[in-house]
Amino acid sequence: MAQGEFYQQRAGERAGRPTSRRRPDAGVYHLIIRLPRAARVRVGRLGLFTFPAGWYVYTGSAMNGLRARIARHRRRRKKLHWHIDYLLRRAEIVEVIEVPTRRRVECARHRHVLRLPGAQVPAPGFGSSDCRCISHLAYFARRPQL
Ligand SMILES: [Zn+2]
Protein backbone atom coordinates (compact mmCIF):
# COMPACT_ATOMS: atom_id res chain seq x y z
CA MET A 1 0.00 0.00 0.00
CA ALA A 2 1.35 3.42 -0.90
CA GLN A 3 2.28 5.70 1.93
CA GLY A 4 -0.22 8.38 2.77
CA GLU A 5 -3.13 6.74 1.03
CA PHE A 6 -4.89 6.35 4.30
CA TYR A 7 -4.24 7.25 7.87
CA GLN A 8 -4.99 5.74 11.21
CA GLN A 9 -6.81 7.16 14.12
CA ARG A 10 -6.32 5.71 17.55
CA ALA A 11 -9.82 5.72 18.92
CA GLY A 12 -9.30 3.99 22.27
CA GLU A 13 -9.89 6.68 24.86
CA ARG A 14 -11.22 9.15 22.33
CA ALA A 15 -14.19 7.10 21.19
CA GLY A 16 -17.28 9.22 20.88
CA ARG A 17 -15.41 12.32 19.80
CA PRO A 18 -16.97 13.92 16.75
CA THR A 19 -15.16 12.93 13.59
CA SER A 20 -14.52 15.03 10.53
CA ARG A 21 -17.17 15.00 7.83
CA ARG A 22 -14.47 14.57 5.22
CA ARG A 23 -13.51 11.14 6.54
CA PRO A 24 -15.45 8.38 4.83
CA ASP A 25 -17.68 6.45 7.21
CA ALA A 26 -16.22 3.33 5.69
CA GLY A 27 -13.08 1.37 6.16
CA VAL A 28 -11.10 -1.21 8.01
CA TYR A 29 -10.57 -1.51 11.73
CA HIS A 30 -8.57 -3.49 14.22
CA LEU A 31 -9.96 -4.37 17.62
CA ILE A 32 -7.25 -4.79 20.23
CA ILE A 33 -8.77 -7.23 22.69
CA ARG A 34 -7.68 -8.52 26.07
CA LEU A 35 -8.83 -11.86 27.37
CA PRO A 36 -8.09 -11.91 31.11
CA ARG A 37 -8.30 -15.69 31.52
CA ALA A 38 -8.34 -18.65 29.18
CA ALA A 39 -11.80 -19.38 27.86
CA ARG A 40 -13.46 -22.21 26.04
CA VAL A 41 -15.83 -20.56 23.61
CA ARG A 42 -18.21 -21.96 21.04
CA VAL A 43 -17.84 -19.70 18.02
CA GLY A 44 -21.14 -20.25 16.24
CA ARG A 45 -20.91 -22.98 13.63
CA LEU A 46 -17.13 -22.68 13.42
CA GLY A 47 -16.84 -24.82 16.55
CA LEU A 48 -15.47 -24.90 20.05
CA PHE A 49 -12.06 -23.36 20.74
CA THR A 50 -9.90 -22.79 23.79
CA PHE A 51 -8.61 -19.24 23.68
CA PRO A 52 -5.55 -18.66 25.87
CA ALA A 53 -5.42 -15.62 28.11
CA GLY A 54 -3.68 -12.72 26.46
CA TRP A 55 -4.17 -10.33 23.58
CA TYR A 56 -6.08 -10.64 20.35
CA VAL A 57 -6.25 -8.49 17.26
CA TYR A 58 -9.36 -8.80 15.13
CA THR A 59 -9.44 -7.16 11.72
CA GLY A 60 -12.75 -6.30 10.12
CA SER A 61 -14.22 -3.91 7.61
CA ALA A 62 -17.43 -1.96 7.23
CA MET A 63 -17.85 -0.36 3.85
CA ASN A 64 -21.24 1.00 4.84
CA GLY A 65 -21.12 2.47 8.33
CA LEU A 66 -17.76 2.11 10.06
CA ARG A 67 -18.83 4.10 13.12
CA ALA A 68 -22.00 2.09 13.66
CA ARG A 69 -20.08 -1.15 13.32
CA ILE A 70 -17.57 -0.16 15.97
CA ALA A 71 -20.34 1.03 18.26
CA ARG A 72 -21.95 -2.37 17.85
CA HIS A 73 -18.73 -4.17 18.75
CA ARG A 74 -18.56 -2.10 21.95
CA ARG A 75 -22.15 -2.89 22.95
CA ARG A 76 -22.40 -5.69 25.51
CA ARG A 77 -25.94 -6.85 24.81
CA LYS A 78 -26.62 -7.92 21.26
CA LYS A 79 -27.67 -10.84 19.15
CA LEU A 80 -24.66 -12.97 18.31
CA HIS A 81 -23.94 -12.69 14.61
CA TRP A 82 -20.24 -12.50 13.75
CA HIS A 83 -17.57 -14.85 15.11
CA ILE A 84 -16.08 -11.98 17.07
CA ASP A 85 -19.36 -11.49 18.95
CA TYR A 86 -18.82 -14.83 20.70
CA LEU A 87 -15.30 -13.97 21.84
CA LEU A 88 -16.28 -10.50 23.01
CA ARG A 89 -18.70 -11.97 25.53
CA ARG A 90 -15.61 -13.04 27.52
CA ALA A 91 -13.12 -10.40 26.48
CA GLU A 92 -12.65 -6.67 26.55
CA ILE A 93 -11.95 -4.24 23.70
CA VAL A 94 -9.00 -2.19 24.90
CA GLU A 95 -8.43 -0.13 21.78
CA VAL A 96 -9.89 0.36 18.32
CA ILE A 97 -7.70 1.38 15.40
CA GLU A 98 -9.73 2.76 12.53
CA VAL A 99 -8.47 3.00 8.98
CA PRO A 100 -10.98 5.13 7.08
CA THR A 101 -10.79 4.14 3.44
CA ARG A 102 -12.99 3.03 0.61
CA ARG A 103 -10.34 0.60 -0.55
CA ARG A 104 -10.72 -3.06 0.34
CA VAL A 105 -7.58 -3.49 2.37
CA GLU A 106 -8.91 -5.65 5.20
CA CYS A 107 -7.02 -8.80 4.23
CA ALA A 108 -3.77 -6.95 3.51
CA ARG A 109 -4.02 -5.23 6.90
CA HIS A 110 -4.56 -8.54 8.65
CA ARG A 111 -1.59 -10.12 6.86
CA HIS A 112 0.43 -7.27 8.33
CA VAL A 113 -0.89 -8.13 11.82
CA LEU A 114 0.06 -11.79 11.34
CA ARG A 115 3.64 -10.73 10.56
CA LEU A 116 4.05 -8.97 13.91
CA PRO A 117 6.37 -10.74 16.38
CA GLY A 118 4.66 -13.50 18.33
CA ALA A 119 1.49 -13.62 16.23
CA GLN A 120 -0.42 -16.91 16.29
CA VAL A 121 -3.64 -18.13 14.72
CA PRO A 122 -5.84 -19.42 17.56
CA ALA A 123 -8.93 -20.33 15.52
CA PRO A 124 -8.60 -21.06 11.79
CA GLY A 125 -11.57 -19.68 9.86
CA PHE A 126 -12.40 -17.05 12.47
CA GLY A 127 -13.72 -13.96 10.71
CA SER A 128 -12.59 -15.13 7.31
CA SER A 129 -15.65 -16.85 5.89
CA ASP A 130 -15.73 -14.40 2.97
CA CYS A 131 -12.08 -14.43 1.95
CA ARG A 132 -9.12 -16.75 1.57
CA CYS A 133 -7.30 -15.74 4.74
CA ILE A 134 -6.63 -18.41 7.33
CA SER A 135 -8.33 -16.16 9.89
CA HIS A 136 -8.92 -12.51 10.79
CA LEU A 137 -8.03 -13.08 14.43
CA ALA A 138 -4.47 -13.11 15.72
CA TYR A 139 -3.31 -14.06 19.20
CA PHE A 140 -0.39 -12.57 21.13
CA ALA A 141 0.84 -13.47 24.61
CA ARG A 142 1.85 -9.81 25.07
CA ARG A 143 0.17 -6.69 23.82
CA PRO A 144 1.29 -6.12 20.22
CA GLN A 145 2.35 -2.77 18.82
CA LEU A 146 0.37 -2.10 15.66
ZN1 LIG B 1 -9.14 -11.95 4.60
Image (cartoon, rainbow, N blue to C red):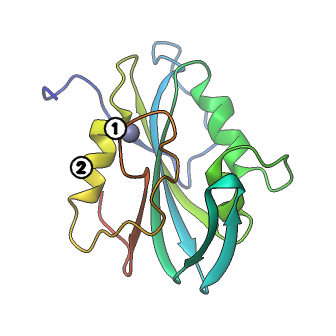
Nearer the observer: mark 1 or 2; the answer is 1
Helix, strand or loop status at disc 2 = helix
Q: Is residue 123 above or below residue 45?
A: below
Please identify the quarter of the rendering in which residue 6 is found. top left
Residue at the image point whose x is 21% and y is 70% from the top: 117
Does mark 1's beta carbon lie closer than 8 Å to ligand 1?
yes
Q: Quadrant of the C terminus?
A: bottom left
- Residue at the extreme top: 22
Helix, strand or loop status at disc 1 = helix
In the foreground, 108 or 20: 108
Residue 11's x, y, as percent? 51, 46
- Residue at the extreme left: 2
In space, the residues marked 1 and 2 are separated at their CA atoms by 9 Å
> Which dot marks residue 107?
1
> Which dot marks residue 112?
2
Q: Is residue 49 above or below residue 137?
A: below
Residue 32's x, y, as percent? 48, 60
Q: Give the quarter the ligand 1 occupies.
A: top left
